[in-house]
Amino acid sequence: MKLSDERRLTFALFLFVPVVCFFVFIVYPIFRSLTLSFQEWDGLSQNIEFVGWANYKKIFSSELLWVSLTNNLKWLVFSLLAPTMLGFFLALLVDQKVKGESLFQVFFFIPYAITPVAVASVWSWLYSPRGGVINQLLTSIGLPQFRQVWIGNPDIATYSVMLASLWWSTGFAMVLYFSGLRGIPPELLEAADVDGASFWVKLRKIVFPQLLPSTIVVMAMQGISAMRVFDLIYAMTGGGPGISTHVLATMMFDVSFNRFEMGAGSAIAVVLLVISSAIILPYVFHSSKGLEELRS
Amino acid sequence: MKTNRFSLDRALRRSLIYAILVAASAFFLVPLAMMILTSVKSPAEIVDLFSFPKAIYYKNFSIAISQIGRGLLNSVCITLPAVLLSSMLGAIAAYPLSQFRFRGDQIVYMVLLSGLFVPYQIVMIPLFQIIRSLHIYDTYLGMWLVHTAYGVPICTFYMRNYFATIPRSLMEASIIDGCTLTGYFFRVLIKLGKPGFSVVVILQARAVWNDLLFGLSLTRSRTVTPVTVELAKYVGQTDIQYGSLMAATLISIIPTVLIFLLFKENFIRGILGGSVKS
């Protein structure tokens, strides 16, 4: 349909405030962060100095950045695999026409309805070395040798935070996969039954291919959240002990808002943006292609 | 293919499924149960982890309120207006995007999506600058503005997809009846969009309530900081009393858990819709 000038104007007015918001709060800040990463600024004074690549040189030569990057990669591998596989597995079980189906769904999903900071709070109690739940549980079932200083030991602290994250985010993958499973046309599975296909054959030949769209979404969401992970770490360990649990997001916050090195902070943010974009862009293209089908 | 419906094999498999489901439920529920149990016990009773208290130890809750009570109030005051504003603005932007094809609509859509995925760290410092120069650092107004601005992409995204399900012929018919484009939006589309709104409102309420990063970087005083910041501070204290910490945690999760349990369908639909197209 052709748009008349009057309609054009009306729609332009509708889009005006959101578009302004977008430029002021997203486009401009990204641009400003890019320029700020070549400058030095303490966050408050009027003094802003151009320093070239100095911020990048500084962050890339600091141990903190490499620890953070490594941890982000660990988070990426973890997020792509653990909550995804556990979520799929649980969705598959709940989908086996079990009694109390919706009750189990609620149980698995409830942690995802909780603020990440509250998750951090609950798990810091579970992990507490002085009389915390997990250590006491280990003692009472006769396995005191497995007691750990869960988040106080730099070698395992990141993995301990990941376990809390698994508890929190599995429900998300579970509901996505569950709705994907329910979306599989029953004829497909019935036809396979007629052919006498085993459970495993059906899983491989029908369920996995049919769940590909759900998997793409889950992977994209998990990938992006692995790069963004902040709340849990900030509240549980603050990046410590030492610098062992820092990721780019907590490092950026620390450098910018505790040390007031806004230039270096911006440089970290740019690194974070570049990596996240590389992970998410394929998904954005994939899903904007879907727009065509949606319209017709 | 006929299998013996009364086979032991089948019964065993069913039991195994239930056993795993029950074990998984324990993994997800025990931490919550421990939080609730700990919150009603006195410091002396907490030492014995799995015991029940003789009486509910209310003092934990009064300490918790003194720690995070104000933050809770702040979160309510921040969340309600921010959610209303962003879902309204999202619907406004979604209207043209859902009803017409125009040059560059593909680009607008891509831009929206990227707005959903941009890591907040990249906008953090300039945002801090903007908010300070507008003199709304450490105010409710600043938090409303920020949460609205960053909520608009997801709200637009979701409402666009929702409005797209409402037949366009309805608009043409209304316009032939003498309704203006603006009138159609305010009188017809908004009413028909109610189910979409209820999803967006829940989605946004959860996002704003959960926010920690903006609260940390854009607020400072007790009269403004949201509950997430107060709770994070509380967790970080040394020599903490776990009874009152768990009471504080329990109080802080009640709003979102309640919303989830009451509006389970819409809550999950929002989570799905926020990530899946259409």
Image (cartoon, coloured by chain):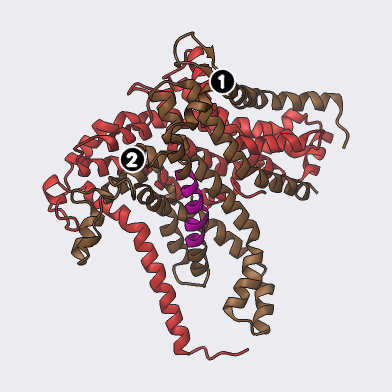
Q: Which of A72 and B148 is in front in this view?
A: A72
Which mark is on residue B72? none
Chain name for mark 1: A
Looking at the rendered structure, the secondary structure element under dot 2 is loop
Note whether A149 is above or below B206 in the view shown: below
Q: Give the range drawn in magenta.
A: A71-87
Q: Chain A is drawn in which colour?
A: brown
* Front residue of this view, candidates B164 and B150: B150
Amino acid type for the residue under numbered disc 2: Thr
Locate residue A42, reporting x and y percent: 44, 16
Chain letter for mark 2, please: A
Horizontal side of B111 relative to A182 (left or right) equals: right
Q: How crowded is mark 2: few (under 14 residues within 10 Å), some or many (20 or more)?
A: many
Q: Is residue A87 above or below residue A233?
A: below
**Mark seen at residue A38:** 1
Residue A237 badge: 2
* Residue at image coords 39%, 64%: B24
Q: Chain B is drawn in which colour?
A: red
Q: Does residue B85 appear in the picture of this structure?
A: no
Q: Which x, y percent locates residue B155?
A: 60, 37
Residue visible at 38% across and 73% down in the picture: B19
Label 1 is placed on what type of residue?
Answer: Phe
